[in-house]
Amino acid sequence: MTEFERDEQSFLDIFPPLLHGLLRQCDWSRLLEVVLDLGAPLECRFLGSSQRFSEHVVDRNMLMYVMQQIGPFNRDNRSGVERSLHRISAIRNRQGDVVGLTCRLGRPLLGTITPILEWVQSGRSLLFLGPPGIGKTTKLREVARWLATDFGKRVMIVDTSNEIAGDGDIPHPVIGYARRMQVSDPLLQHEVMIEAVQNHTPEVIVVDEIGSELEAHAARTIAERGVQLVATAHGYTIENLMKNPLLCDLLGGIQPVVLGDDEAKLRGSQKTVLERKAKPTFDVVVEIRDRMTMAIYRDVAKAVDGILAGDRVIPDIRQLSTDGESEVVPVLGFRVVALGISNGYVERVMSALGHSFEWVDSIDRANLVVGVPSKTKRIPGHNRDGQPIQLIRVPSNRLVEVESACRTLLGNPTQVDKLEDDAIIEIERLVAQVKQRGQAMDAYPRPQMIRRLQHDVVASHDLNSISVGEEPGRRVRIFPQASSPI
């Protein structure tokens, strides 16, 4: 049995035997995780889709069986299977009882960092940026293995929740000769990061999910001591990180500066401007657009300065081809101008939709304009070459709105239909649960046009609903008849 087959078998073994046949029939090459929520059908999530099995409703016995096969949950409600990369996360009720489990299948994938090897081996500190579930931790594992085993460096992994090297005292062989320090409490990750530098003379420190101000300060301390730091953080673009008050220090921090009259006139700006405060902790930032595409900012200081100055900052776009080799994404297809919209948002959506494009500096050279209404009032119908200009108006500069508008006009219609179908199925299921339980429930976050559709479905059942939360996490909340929206 191969290592890959052993990992799949260890994942299958945590579930009750009555589910084995069902799970074996799933497309394991696309399976991401299995979700068990008390009173709801078993759900399998795949790349780009999910499937629910109404004949298998999750009960407490099923939850208890799974919990007996895994290690104890840590403070962050995560557990795992010894010597595997699988992650099991718990959802608890008010009394602390587990009422839901998210069981993620961990795979030892290789070849995912081919497009960025030149930056990994350069010794420069590197930050992976992307939303949950897009493959940041997978790339961390391969960076650790490659630097320790193939390049002979002293690599120490700070492994919170055993996310990188797996559960148990013996790490998964996927990290090669890299060593790892486990973290007993997620709140102590910053202390273990400093301890790793002080006690074990590493040349490289690898850390997953820098998410607090203390961890950001620890990262700066590591970088200032001359140790290469490779880490991840949540966020879609480098601009998201610049706006995060807890983590913007990773990019050098941002401060307001008051200019003199002459300087302001010379720059053509207001007297108060935003500038970078210090040298960035990381030299290189890699935005993971999807599992095959990465955008590399090879000089973070220059990129941040350019964004603050209002310049158009274009990263290197690298893609992993089907044969495992790296290739530069060609700048063909759409010639794009963004007005009042983040370039990073547009790039992410265009890459996800499979469109090649290039940025141009004027509307008369473009064939696609993406912008907010206030900036797109007088867009001509054709460019200087006589080609029609396609206009996509986006309500606001938010990723969820950009994605919704671009998918509607540029995406495959079946993709949009699938999105709507999934949203309706979900809201119908929640309506039934709200009626049964008599308590308010939230749907998954959705784009604005999909939420409107969900509100209509709720109203057809004579129930009330509102949208709650901030984008991109804004979602529909359904109330039983006895309740009213707050």
Image: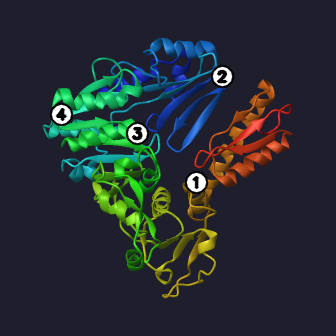
Q: Which residue is mark 1?
A: 400
The structure residue drawn at horizontal position 39% and vertical position 76%, both measured from the top left corner, is 267
Disc marking residue 202: 4
Which badge, 4 or 3, comes first in the chain's sequence? 4
Which badge, 3 or 1, comes first in the chain's sequence? 3
The structure residue drawn at horizontal position 42% and vertical position 15%, both measured from the top left corner, is 71
SS category of the residue bearing label 4: loop
Where residue 7 appears, as percent x and y from the top left, is 37, 25
Q: Is residue 250 above or below residue 203?
A: below
Which badge, 1 or 4, comes first in the chain's sequence? 4
The amino acid on which the numbered mark 3 sits, given as a three-letter code, is Glu
Q: Quadrant of the N terminus?
A: top left
Which badge, 4 or 2, comes first in the chain's sequence? 2
Question: Real-space Cα distance between discs 1 and 4?
Answer: 40 Å
In this rendering, does residue 164 appear at all?
A: no
The amino acid on which the numbered mark 1 sits, given as a three-letter code, is Val
At label 2, counting other C-alpha atoms closer than 10 Å, the crowd grade (few under 14, some 14-19, many 20 or more) is some
Question: Real-space Cα distance between discs 4 and 3?
Answer: 23 Å
Q: Do callouts 1 and 4 mark residues in contact (Cβ within 8 Å)? A: no
